[in-house]
Amino acid sequence: MRALFVRDLTLALRAGGGFGLGLAFFLIVVVLVPFSVGPAPDLLARIAPGVLWLGALLACLLSLDRLLAVDFEDGALDLLATSPLPLEGVVAVKAAAHWVTTGLPLVLAAPVLGVLLNLAPEGYSVLVISLALGTPALSMIGAFGAALTVGIKRGGLLMSLLVLPLYVPTLIFGAEAARRAVEGLNATTPLLFVAGITAGVLALMPFAAGAVLRVNLR
């Protein structure tokens, strides 16, 4: 598992498709929003939590279509399926590598980009916590979607349609936590919901993705 994790990290950093592309997309979304809604600091401050969470979600989604497709195309996925490592472990490791190269940089970049949206100072810490709790679920759900569409030519659009509805609860509670912090309210409840969703996803999705992969590789 360690070797597979290091391999996926190395490939993602060399190709630049995870780390660089996700950050660039996140930056573009945040920079374009003030142009679309106008130079209204109060309005930007109100919508900043939702915009930052939506930008992070779409940036995570951007690199998911190649999560398993590259290994399927070059035959590495077949070798992994016959290795002592179970497919559930393969999916979990790939989701972890995706989070490290995509989700973690977004978590670290969110406070910096929050300045561009006039995010209230009270919201920075809760925004980072909510993203740190929620983005692992996005990567794991994305790995499940990648397993569903592996082997399908141009399956990126289909995967997006399958994954986006599963992303909605995390998006709702993550943005709500940051919004409550900005308004001076208690954000504990939505943060607990985000943590609960992530815990459930990490517990169940590897087994679901492993079962789907076994069917698709037959």
Image (spheres, rainbow, N blue to C red):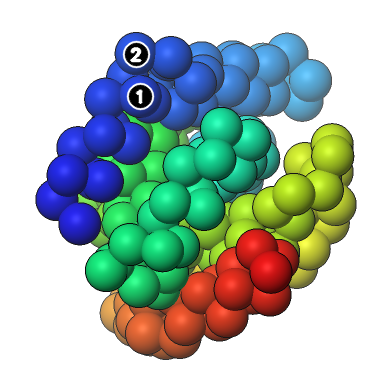
Residue 11's tag is 1
Which residue bears the numbered disc 2?
A: 14
In the displayed structure, would residue 216 be above or below residue 61? below
Name of the residue lying farthest toward the left: 2
Q: Position of residue 27 (x, y in %)?
A: 51, 19
Q: Position of residue 28 (x, y in %)?
A: 60, 16
Mark 1–mark 2 CB contact (< 8 Å): yes
In depth, the one of 85 and 43 nearer the eye is 85
Q: Is residue 207 left or right of residue 29?
A: left
Mark 2 is surrounded, within 10 Å at the Cα level, by few (under 14), some (14 to 19) or many (20 or more) other residues, namely few
Q: Position of residue 16 (x, y in %)?
A: 42, 15
In the displayed structure, would residue 120 be above or below residue 173? above
In depth, the one of 146 and 116 nearer the eye is 146
Q: Is residue 207 left or right of residue 39?
A: left
Residue 157 seen in the figure: yes
Q: Position of residue 107 (x, y in %)?
A: 32, 41
Helix, strand or loop status at disc 2: helix
In the displayed structure, would residue 17 be above or below residue 122? above
Which quarter of the figure has residue 191? bottom left
Kindly identify the amino acid type of the residue bearing the numbered disc 1: Leu
Which quarter of the figure has residue 166? bottom right
Quadrant of the rendering where the N terminus is positioned:
bottom left
Q: Is residue 36 left or right of residue 75?
A: right
Determine the residue positioned at 77% across, 41% down. 156
In depth, the one of 2 and 176 nearer the eye is 2
Kindly identify the amino acid type of the residue bearing the numbered disc 2: Arg
Determine the residue positioned at 35% across, 73% down. 86
